[in-house]
Amino acid sequence: QHIITVVRPGFATALTETVTATSGNTWTAKLLPNVESGDFLIEENYPGLRGRYTQTRHFTILNAPVITSPVAGGHVKEQRPVVSGDGKPNATVRIYQENSGVTLYGEVLVPPDGHWSTPVRVELPEGSFTFTAQQTFGTALSLWAKGVTVTASNRPVISPEPIFQETNFKLPGSHSEAGATVQVFRDLTQYMV
């Protein structure tokens, strides 16, 4: 029975959960959180005996990117907001709607400082929208970023919709930015009422 642990050269601290190889001598070890890319050794032990190490291997670890803006629960007023976050320098981050993976909403090369930012390429639909992202580095593909759900409201709404009004009237509405000036135009024309 082989007991497998992954460590850094010169250190005994395990970087993975300890696993036991199967009868076919195969195994899979899950890295502990926050392990960075670098050189690794695979330690093989037998019950009651100190085992051996493999040759040093270099692994690139590609964690999921993190979306930092907009914030979860926020209200997005722009049809094409800027999305920002953190990723691996020189990786490519792609932004999608969570559980879709079809429409690419944005793409950006992560700069050397690891902080990326890009405007959304496709107008967001009205209502609840959950951003997620994935990054690639060479041929490596990360897991999906934790979803960030926002409410997209791109236009002021007149409510209730008037059918007939007197010459002078008040027009209630919602979903406009606090302090913004709302202008009402006649039937999608440039004629302001």
Image (cartoon, rainbow, N blue to C red):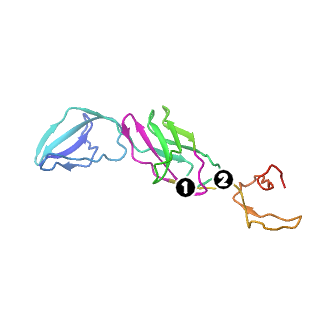
Q: Which residue is mark 2?
A: 154
Q: CA distance from mark 2 to mark 1?
A: 12 Å
Q: Which residue is mark 1?
A: 129
Is 107 part of what is drawn in magenta? no
**Three-letter amino acid code of the residue under disc 2:** Asn
The residue sitting at 21% across, 49% down in the picture is 19
Viewer-proximal residue among 137 and 97: 97
Viewer-proximal residue among 51 and 93: 93
> Farthest residue toward the right?
167
Asked which secondary structure carries label 1, the reply is: strand
Residue 10 in the image: state x and y as whole percent: 24, 34
The residue sitting at 23% across, 47% down in the picture is 28
Asked which secondary structure carries label 2, the reply is: loop
Is 138 part of what is drawn in magenta? yes
Q: Which mark is residue 51?
A: none
Q: Which residues are magenta?
A: 122-147
Circles 2 and 1 in contact, beta carbons < 8 Å: no
> Which is nearer the N-term, disc 2 or disc 1?
1
Residue 173 in the image: state x and y as whole percent: 74, 62
- Quarter of the image for residue 34 reads top left
Residue 193 in the image: state x and y as whole percent: 84, 55
Query: How would you rate the neighbour count of disc 1 (Cα within 10 Å): few for under 14, some for 14-19, many for 20 or more?
Result: some
The residue sitting at 26% across, 44% down in the picture is 14
Residue 85 in the image: state x and y as whole percent: 51, 43
Give left or right: position of 3 versus 150.
left
Give left or right: position of 22 versus 117.
left
**Three-letter amino acid code of the residue under disc 1:** Phe
Q: Number of numbered discs present?
A: 2
